[in-house]
Image: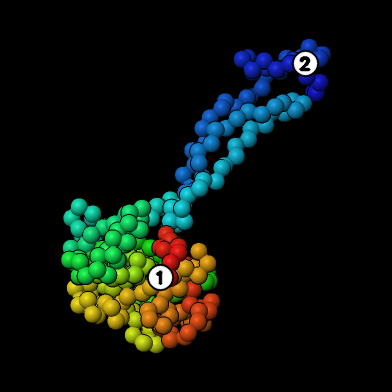
């Protein structure tokens, strides 16, 4: 076959060699490449230049700036971090069907203002609703400093381990940051477990569990469920109150409490999406 090309007629889809031979070719038409995998944007197929008699078809996927929570359950599934949270009804419905009422939902963008106002009112002894429960508008993942170390509860006694894989039973790894309006620290939180409908508790040096009812007394929350979420380096956090630190054991992935005076790698956690990147 003659390889020296005089020209290509894209309308008739033919090309003619220098020796006058006309040959018909199949030229692919431009088309859209629809990408369904999370993190990839749809991109347009384009025809590129002709080299000799070869025509090249190139499609290049572009990575999107999507959050970690987008499609984390797999390529075909989007994790809804607002599932069960009803702002207008002031309720949160957890995986087991428990409906928690009387909750004020706060958007992340409004969080700094709301917490400052509440802290100021509490410090002045103003008429805040002492037991008013406030929660953020989306669930969080909490993990330790290793692969597959997301917090998850057991089905037996609601103990917490850092052995969860975010792509598996992700609902069991949902924790909702909440607080009482009477708390003065703008970085103080308690964590509602989606799997149990109860609040994460600590008890001295024992294993943490998600078993305190949201209907409990404020003194119970203050003693067992209140955590200060403090920035370690802007990305990693440590949870403590007072002098107490949460930590996870790398060997068996148990999440426990510790009275250590300083933080170590086992005391650091990553909240996704982030909570309080500064403070403490």
Instruction: Mark 1 vs mark 2: give the one in front.
Output: 1
Q: Residue at x 26, y 72 (%)?
A: 198
Q: Quadrant of the rendered structure where residue 230 is?
A: bottom left
Does residue 155 appear in this view? no
The quadrant the C terminus occupies is bottom left
Counting the numbered discs, the total is: 2
Question: Horizontally, is 90 left or right of 67 in the view?
Answer: left
SS at mark 2 in the image = strand
Instruction: Estimate how packed mark 2 is, as few (under 14), some (14 to 19) or many (20 or more) residues with alpha carbons within 10 Å.
Output: few
* Residue 222 percent coordinates (x, y): 28, 78
The foreground one among 267 and 49 is 267
Position of 158 relative to 92 (above/below): below
Mark 1 near mark 2, Cβ–Cβ under 8 Å? Answer: no
* Residue 159 percent coordinates (x, y): 35, 79
Position of 117 relative to 256 (above/below): above
Q: Which residue is mark 2?
A: 6
Q: Quadrant of the rendered structure where residue 275 is?
A: bottom left
Q: Quadrant of the rendered structure where residue 184 is?
A: bottom left
Q: Residue at x 51, y 45 (%)?
A: 64
Does residue 1 appear in this view? yes
Question: Horizontally, is 275 left or right of 52 in the view?
Answer: left
SS at mark 1 in the image = strand
In the picture, the disc for residue 275 is: none
Which numbered disc flags the more N-terminal residue, 1 or 2? 2
Q: CA distance from mark 1 to mark 2?
A: 71 Å
Question: Horizontally, is 72 left or right of 153 in the view?
Answer: right
Q: Which residue is mark 1?
A: 229
């Amino acid at each position: 076959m003659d390889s020296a090309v005089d020209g290509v007629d894209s309308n008739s889809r033919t090309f003619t060699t220098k020796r006058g031979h006309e040959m018909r070719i199949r030229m692919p038409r431009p088309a859209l490449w629809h990408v369904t995998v999370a993190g990839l944007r749809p991109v347009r197929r384009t025809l590129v230049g002709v080299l000799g008699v070869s025509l090249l078809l190139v499609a290049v996927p572009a990575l999107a700036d999507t959050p970690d929570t987008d499609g984390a359950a797999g390529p075909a599934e989007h994790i809804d971090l607002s599932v069960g949270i009803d702002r207008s009804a002031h309720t949160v419905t957890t995986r087991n069907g428990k409906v928690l009422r009387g909750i004020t939902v706060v958007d992340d963008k409004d969080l700094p203002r709301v917490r400052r106002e509440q802290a100021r009112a509490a410090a002045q002894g103003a008429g805040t609703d002492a037991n008013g429960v406030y929660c953020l508008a989306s669930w969080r993942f909490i993990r330790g400093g290793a692969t597959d170390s997301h917090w998850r509860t057991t089905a037996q006694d609601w103990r917490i381990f850092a052995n969860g894989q975010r792509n598996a039973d992700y609902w069991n790894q949902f924790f909702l940051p909440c607080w009482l309006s009477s708390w003065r620290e703008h970085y103080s939180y308690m964590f509602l477990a989606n799997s149990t409908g109860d609040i994460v508790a600590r008890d001295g040096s024992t294993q943490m569990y998600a078993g305190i009812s949201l209907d409990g007394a404020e003194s119970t929350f203050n003693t067992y469920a209140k955590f200060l979420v403090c920035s370690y380096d802007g990305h990693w956090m440590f949870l403590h109150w007072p002098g107490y630190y949460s930590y996870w054991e790398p060997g068996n992935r148990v999440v426990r409490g510790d009275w250590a005076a300083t933080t170590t790698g086992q005391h650091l956690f990553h909240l996704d999406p982030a909570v309080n990147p500064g403070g403490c």
